[in-house]
């Protein structure tokens, strides 16, 4: 089987290369924003969507025009790929509108800001040279760049993405290679219940405590944000304060990512089948503020809950777990999450009264007692086995009938 894998390293550019990196990222951002503005104006005029081929002709005109002739200084392939990124963003958005239940998490394309997600891609591997022995890589119009070679690049080079974050530049080298079909050495199956008090509770009774990287840095972040707010915007002192705020955000994200990688690696190596709740994180963390006419209730409490949900990184946890299990020969299954912590795993009685507190579960029918998160993990695993036995469609139809019965009982 073929495996696509990215290897990311920190670049060590000199002063001139650092200047060009900012220029090329700015040029790609300019092309993306100008093409997006053109698409919006074209839509308002009632015209059809401008495809990549037609948009590439506009790029040629911009490069040859007198006002934007500076675009010629940037490599053309990254500029063209910025147009492809825009077209892909539009397609993802319309695909989500056609099928709201799709896994695509794409909103309407937005204009890019300077300093936020600066990146550009070299899609042609023929223009890229990788010298791992001397820890350097050759990129068009940038020349040879040094990088921190922390691990060996495996496979045939496909493309390279350069990105800047918090004053540092990184290179992501995507490769493709043939590997044997992986066979999992583990033989166990496990269900996982995700939560706030416990990050992940397993059906065998064990659990992973939450990291709460944002909560840990929240007070320090607020202090530096207040300092930044008291500075004259865009002044040198404001830029210094902003750099400190960005550094804290980077530390929060890096700490969370490291935590998730370690957790998902351990799970994928120890289990062949993993069942997880099919959580709609976007809906769960939606604001409860409401509108001026219909204000929301318990807005402050819901805001705190939303921060806690986002701080856990459930979506990234599921994404990492999915590909790591596949790499190790295992499989990940997402099952309906309705009433997993309210259903008794012994007699299968479903009631909100079963969960007396956030942690305590006592069945009102058979008096089964356990931790509520452990009960949820057990039910997730059971539903996962039902999913394998009767298929996705049959399970969801069964769940729909069960939810209807529970709704009638509660009414």
Image: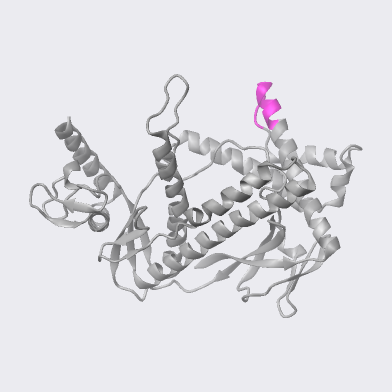
Determine the residue positioned at 7% across, 52% down.
Answer: 366
Determine the residue positioned at 65% across, 31% down.
Answer: 49
Question: Which one is nearer the viewer's eye here, 232 or 134?
Answer: 232
Determine the residue positioned at 61% across, 43% down.
Answer: 88
Residue found farthest to the right: 66
| Residue 128 horizontal side relative to residue 335, left or right | right
**In what quadrant of the picture does the C terminus appear?**
top left
Compared to residue 189, the image places residue 225 above or below, namely above
Compared to residue 180, the image places residue 195 above or below, namely above
Q: Is residue 329 in view?
A: no
Whole-percent x and y of residue 109? 61, 37
State which quadrant residue 276 falls in: bottom left
Determine the residue positioned at 49% across, 44% down.
Answer: 104
Compared to residue 107, the image places residue 333 above or below, namely below
Whole-percent x and y of residue 166? 68, 56
Q: Reply yes or no: does residue 221 show up in magenta.
A: no
Question: Which one is nearer the viewer's eye here, 305 or 83?
Answer: 305
Whole-percent x and y of residue 250? 60, 57
State which quadrant residue 90 falls in: top right
Q: Reply yes or no: does residue 41 show up in magenta.
A: yes
Magenta region: which residues?
Answer: 39-49
Residue found farthest to the top: 293
Q: Is residue 21 in view?
A: yes
Whole-percent x and y of residue 149? 67, 75
Colour scheme used in the picture? Answer: one colour
């Amino acid at each position: 089987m073929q495996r696509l894998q990215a290897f990311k390293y920190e670049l060590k550019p000199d002063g001139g290369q650092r200047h060009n990196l900012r220029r090329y990222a700015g040029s790609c951002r300019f092309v993306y924003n100008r093409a997006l503005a053109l698409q919006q104006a074209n839509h308002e005029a009632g015209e059809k969507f401008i495809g990549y081929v037609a948009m590439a002709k506009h790029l040629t005109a911009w490069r040859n025009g007198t006002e934007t002739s500076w675009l010629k200084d940037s490599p053309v392939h990254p500029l063209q790929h910025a147009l492809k990124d825009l077209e892909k963003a539009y397609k993802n958005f319309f695909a989500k509108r056609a099928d709201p239940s799709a896994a695509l998490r794409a909103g309407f394309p937005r204009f890019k800001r300077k300093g936020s997600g600066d990146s550009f891609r070299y899609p042609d591997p023929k223009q890229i040279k990788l010298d791992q022995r001397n820890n350097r890589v050759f990129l068009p119009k940038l020349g040879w760049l040094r990088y921190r070679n922390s691990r060996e690049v495996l496979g045939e080079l496909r493309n390279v993405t350069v990105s800047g974050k918090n004053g540092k530049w990184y290179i992501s080298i995507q490769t493709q290679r043939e590997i044997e079909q992986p066979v999992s050495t583990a033989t166990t199956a496990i269900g996982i219940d995700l939560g706030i008090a416990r990050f992940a509770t397993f059906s065998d009774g064990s659990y992973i405590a939450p990291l709460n990287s944002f909560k840990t840095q929240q007070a320090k972040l607020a202090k530096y944000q207040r300092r930044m707010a008291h500075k004259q915007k865009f002044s040198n002192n404001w830029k210094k304060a902003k750099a400190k705020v960005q550094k804290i955000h980077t530390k929060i994200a890096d700490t969370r990512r490291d935590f998730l990688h370690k957790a998902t690696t351990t799970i994928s190596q120890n289990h062949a089948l993993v069942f997880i709740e099919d959580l709609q994180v976007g809906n769960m963390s939606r604001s409860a503020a409401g509108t001026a006419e219909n204000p929301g209730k318990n807005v402050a409490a819901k805001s705190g809950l939303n921060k806690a949900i986002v701080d856990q990184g459930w979506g990234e946890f599921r994404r990492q777990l999915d590909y790591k299990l596949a790499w190790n020969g295992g499989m990940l299954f997402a099952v309906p999450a309705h009433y997993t912590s309210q259903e008794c795993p012994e007699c299968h009685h479903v009631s909100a009264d079963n969960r007396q507190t956030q942690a305590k579960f006592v069945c009102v029918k058979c008096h089964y007692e356990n931790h509520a998160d452990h009960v949820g993990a057990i039910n997730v695993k059971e539903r996962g086995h039902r999913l394998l036995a009767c298929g996705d469609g049959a399970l969801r139809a069964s769940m729909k009938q069960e939810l209807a019965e529970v709704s009638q009982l509660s009414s």
